[in-house]
């Protein structure tokens, strides 16, 4: 059984950065991708990007290009999502999910609330 | 990026009703589309893949159709547990994905 456990809630100032972690257990971390999806309060799901840990290759939605960096540490089976130049509109719950390709996001982390406020 | 336009954004219906949700792609995506259901406080769960194939374990009252730019999710007879928010997700532009804006299905 795959389990994804994310880091805790964060409160950040506008203009700063946040780094959220996603630790995987069960399954073989390097054999699948990890996608990041966010959900602003009362809003819909927004796909941000993904990484394939075994390759170390990340892809990003155009909206977040230049502001988001997704990395993975195979030694600890942990993926990271760092978002910079934070603004109030980045306040959201950030999820990681196991991405098996062809749009299948089957296991999800519990979500990390990031609040951006001065 | 491929844009996905989902409608309606919200829908009120009664138990037993038949409901249809639509997703339109900004360009042809073949059948590279899935439908997800999200309940409050829970992670999303995929119901339909390849536009019309039912995910294992999903009740047969859910069905999907479409190809190219227009897709529909139909629930043939609403059950109380179906009241949730539904999203389409395109993966034609792999490795990039796009969600639709979501449709909140509420009890009338």
Image: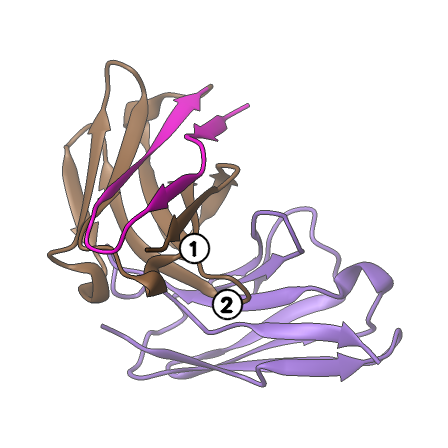
Chain colours: A brown, B purple
Q: Nearer the viewer, residue B96 or A42?
A: A42
In the image, residue B79 sits, relative to residue B3, either above or below, namely above
Of the numbered discs in the image, which one, if any, rests on residue A43?
Answer: 2
Report if residue A17 lies within the magenta region.
yes
Quarter of the picture containing the N terminus of chain A is top right
Tell me: A48 left or right of B11.
Answer: left
Q: CA distance from mark 1 to mark 2?
A: 9 Å
Disc 1 crowd, CA 10 A, few/some/many (<14, 14-19, 20+): many
Quarter of the picture containing the C terminus of chain A is bottom left
Of the numbered discs in the image, which one, if any, rests on residue A70?
Answer: none
In the image, residue A81 sits, relative to residue A45, either above or below, namely above
Q: Residue at x 19, y 54 (%)?
A: A15
From the image, tell me which residue sits under label 1.
Answer: A92
Q: Residue at x 29, y 15 (%)?
A: A76
Magenta highlight range: A1-25
Marked residue chain, label 1: A
Residue A58: % across, % down: 17, 44
- The quadrant holding residue B106 is bottom right
Q: Residue at x 14, y 33 (%)?
A: A56
Q: Nearer the viewer, residue A11 or A75?
A: A11
Residue A114: % across, % down: 40, 47
Q: Nearer the viewer, residue A5 or B88?
A: A5
Disc 2 crowd, CA 10 A, few/some/many (<14, 14-19, 20+): few
Query: Is there a contact, CB below 8 Å, between mark 1 and mark 2?
Result: yes
Q: Secondary structure at mark 1?
A: strand
Q: Secondary structure at mark 2?
A: loop
Q: Residue at x 22, y 29 (%)?
A: A72
């Amino acid at each position: 059984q795959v389990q994804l456990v994310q880091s805790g809630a964060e409160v950040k100032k506008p203009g700063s950065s946040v780094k959220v972690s996603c630790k995987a257990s069960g399954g073989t971390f390097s054999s699948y991708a990890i996608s990041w999806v966010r959900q602003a309060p009362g809003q819909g799901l927004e796909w941000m990007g993904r990484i394939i840990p075994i390759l170390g290759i990340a892809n990003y939605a155009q909206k977040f290009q230049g502001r988001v960096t997704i990395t993975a540490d195979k030694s600890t089976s942990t993926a990271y999502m760092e978002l910079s130049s934070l603004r109030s509109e980045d306040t959201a719950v950030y999820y990681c999910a196991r991405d098996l390709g062809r749009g299948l996001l089957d296991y999800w982390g519990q979500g990390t609330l990031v609040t951006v406020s001065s | 990026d491929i844009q996905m336009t989902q409608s309606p954004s919200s829908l009120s219906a009664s138990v037993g009703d038949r409901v249809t949700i639509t997703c339109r792609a900004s360009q042809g995506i073949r059948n590279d589309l899935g439908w997800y259901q999200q309940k409050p406080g829970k992670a999303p769960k995929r119901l339909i893949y390849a536009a019309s194939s039912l995910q294992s374990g999903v009740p047969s009252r859910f069905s999907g159709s479409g190809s190219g730019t227009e897709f529909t999710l139909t629930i043939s007879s609403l059950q109380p547990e179906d009241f949730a928010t539904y999203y389409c997700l395109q993966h034609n532009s792999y490795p990039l994905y796009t969600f639709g804006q979501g449709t909140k299905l509420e009890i009338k």
